[in-house]
């Protein structure tokens, strides 16, 4: 056995020409760290953005730049993506710039990188789903269903439907009742659970596996925009799902259907602090709604304000409801009046409003139109959130033992009254179109505002249209 084979590193150093620098061999920790960079696609990132030659020293300027970029991208999101939509207001996650120096010095760089991704269970579920749906797409995806009458999917096209459902639902077998399997798919897709393959269900079934991968990637990116340590007490609203959850101590204690902003009045993505509750609130109508919706009605019916118990805050003396105003002569571009709807049974805010100071002027409130909560698609408001379970939610928000009595007393009196909360409660308006279900399945919801489409286009470096600012939205 030769000396060279016994001590290969020593022999290699002997062969280095004079004046040349010997090759720097990486430690096992550095190799593990660089392997994490090479597997960045598992986090929904592009591995080519973090490629380093194998023998690069981790403390070299080249490596540090790449490592810094990866740490920022995987934990806080890639630069510019949050700004694609102008109505996003979330606290920026913080990346400790000294952590990299300490990890390199201590030889635990791989542990640092491994722990940089969002730790939230929903993100971890999306990461697992990403691998699964990528594998499905690489294997050719699933069969597409033809345009046919619903009855065809219980007869001629039943075998095709069964194969399609089985790709995502492992419980589907040759003996499975197809209607039950369709209902499970509809539940995961936010559709009416009738077990019938109608046009909407067929369209959802025909969304490709590759498109589902894109949706998962967009949602993983949005998870990076959130704080690493979410408050255990918080209100959590998923706008595409039109659902609200109140968590106390990290546990869901209240769930409620909500009505969210319609397509032309999207509910923003934000974090705000609930400050208190207003009982029997008046509604100060935003100028945009006054001009676009109320002025045309006044031109047709000068008694409209009186019929809705509305008044002109700055109207002509002695004419608070504008009965003597020639509304055809009032300029829409220079609308001069402030309109307020008095508290009462027909008030657009209902009888309870949760105050939520924020730059978009959106909040949580009651509504006199309770039938809206029975609709499967509930993107119907001007941007604010109407809450079905507003009374118990307001009681939790106030956070004291006498909250229910204070609310009941104020409701009975009928006067407008503000009740301060015992402590501020963080409220998150979020946009999840892919999220884990209670049974471990993956749920999808429609991209009602096109946020996914714009984000996916940016991720693919395609041309994208920047959304307009959210502005002031109410109702």
Image (spheres, rainbow, N blue to C red):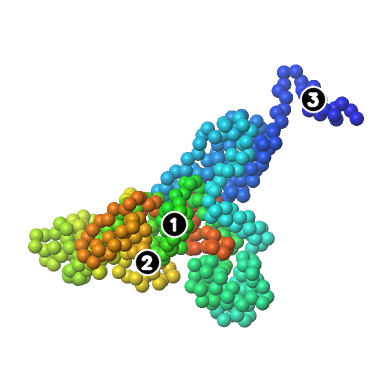
Mark 2 and mark 1 residues within 8 Å of each other at the beta carbon? no
Quadrant location, the N terminus: top right
Where is residue 299, by image quadrant?
bottom left
Instruction: Give the mark nearer the N terminus: 1 vs 3.
Output: 3
Q: Nearer the viewer, mark 1 or mark 3?
A: 1
Task: Report the side of 285 relative to 67 (left or right).
Answer: left
- Counting other residues with Cα less than 10 Å from the Cα at mark 2, is it few (<14), some (14-19), or many (20 or more)? many
Instruction: Please report the residue visible at 25 percent of the width from the left and 69 percent of the height from the top.
Output: 345
Residue 220 location in percent, x, y?
53, 52
Residues at marks 3 and 2, CA–CA distance in whole angstroms: 75 Å
Q: Residue 460 versus residue 130: which sits nearer the camera?
A: 130
Instruction: Give the mark nearer the N terminus: 3 vs 2.
Output: 3
Label 2 SS = loop
Mark 3 and mark 2 residues within 8 Å of each other at the beta carbon? no
Instruction: Please report the residue visible at 11 percent of the width from the left and 66 percent of the height from the top.
Output: 324
Residue most extreme to the top: 18
Residue 137 vertical placement versus 1 (above, below): below
To which residue does mark 1 refer? 247
Mark 1 and mark 3 residues within 8 Å of each other at the beta carbon? no
Q: Residue 245 versus residue 362: which sits nearer the camera?
A: 245
Residue 297 location in percent, x, y?
23, 68
Instruction: Give the mark nearer the N terminus: 2 vs 1.
Output: 1
Instruction: Please report the residue visible at 33 percent of the width from the left and 55 percent of the height from the top.
Output: 400
Q: Nearer the viewer, mark 3 or mark 2?
A: 2
- Counting other residues with Cα less than 10 Å from the Cα at mark 3, is it few (<14), some (14-19), or many (20 or more)? few
Residue 145 location in percent, x, y?
60, 72
Quadrant location, the C terminus: bottom left
Residues at marks 2 and 1, CA–CA distance in whole angstroms: 17 Å
Instruction: Please report the residue visible at 57 percent of the width from the left and 73 percent of the height from the top.
Output: 182
To which residue does mark 2 refer? 388
Q: Residue 263 versus residue 113: which sits nearer the camera?
A: 113
To which residue does mark 3 refer? 10
């Amino acid at each position: 056995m030769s000396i060279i084979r016994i001590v290969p590193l020593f022999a290699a150093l002997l062969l280095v020409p004079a004046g040349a620098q010997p090759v720097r061999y990486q430690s096992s920790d550095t190799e593990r760290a660089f392997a994490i960079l090479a597997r960045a696609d598992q986090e929904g990132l592009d591995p080519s953005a973090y490629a380093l030659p194998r023998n690069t020293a981790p403390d070299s300027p080249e490596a540090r730049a790449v490592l810094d970029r990866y740490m920022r991208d995987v934990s806080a999101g890639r630069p510019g993506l949050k700004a694609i939509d102008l109505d996003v207001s979330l606290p920026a996650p913080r990346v400790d710039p000294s952590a990299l120096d300490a990890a390199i010095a201590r030889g635990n760089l791989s542990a640092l990188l491994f722990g940089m991704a969002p730790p939230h269970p929903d993100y971890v579920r999306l990461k697992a789903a990403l691998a699964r749906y990528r594998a499905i797409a690489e294997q050719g995806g699933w069969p597409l269903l033809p345009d046919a009458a619903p009855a065809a999917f219980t007869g001629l096209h039943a075998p095709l439907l069964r194969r399609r459902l089985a790709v995502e639902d492992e419980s589907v077998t040759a003996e499975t009742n197809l209607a039950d399997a369709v209902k499970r798919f509809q539940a995961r897709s936010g559709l009416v659970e009738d077990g019938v393959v109608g046009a909407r269900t067929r369209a959802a079934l025909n969304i490709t596996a590759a498109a589902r991968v894109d949706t998962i990637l967009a949602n993983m990116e949005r998870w990076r925009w959130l704080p690493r340590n979410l408050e255990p007490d918080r209100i959590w609203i998923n706008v595409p799902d039109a659902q609200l959850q109140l968590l106390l101590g990290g546990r869901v204690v209240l769930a409620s259907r909500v009505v969210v902003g319609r397509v032309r009045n999207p509910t923003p993505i934000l974090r705000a602090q609930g400050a208190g509750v207003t009982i029997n609130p008046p509604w100060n109508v935003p100028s945009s709604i006054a001009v676009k919706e109320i002025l045309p009605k006044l031109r047709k019916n000068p008694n409209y304000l009186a019929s809705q118990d509305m008044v002109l805050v700055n109207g002509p003396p002695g004419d608070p409801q504008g009965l003597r105003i020639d509304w055809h002569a009032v300029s829409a571009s220079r609308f001069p009046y402030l309109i307020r709807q008095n508290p009462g049974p027909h008030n657009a805010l209902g009888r309870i409003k949760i105050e939520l100071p924020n730059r978009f002027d959106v909040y949580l409130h009651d509504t006199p139109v309770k039938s809206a909560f029975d609709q499967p698609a509930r993107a119907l408001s001007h941007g604010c959130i109407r809450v079905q379970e507003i009374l118990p939610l307001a009681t939790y928000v106030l956070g004291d033992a006498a909250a229910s009595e204070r609310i009941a007393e104020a409701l009975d009196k009928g006067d407008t009254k503000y009740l301060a909360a015992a402590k501020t409660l963080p409220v998150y308006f979020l946009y999840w179109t892919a999220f884990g279900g209670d049974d471990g399945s993956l749920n999808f919801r429609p991209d009602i505002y096109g946020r996914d489409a714009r984000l996916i286009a940016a991720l693919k470096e395609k041309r994208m249209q920047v959304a307009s600012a959210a502005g002031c939205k109410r109702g």
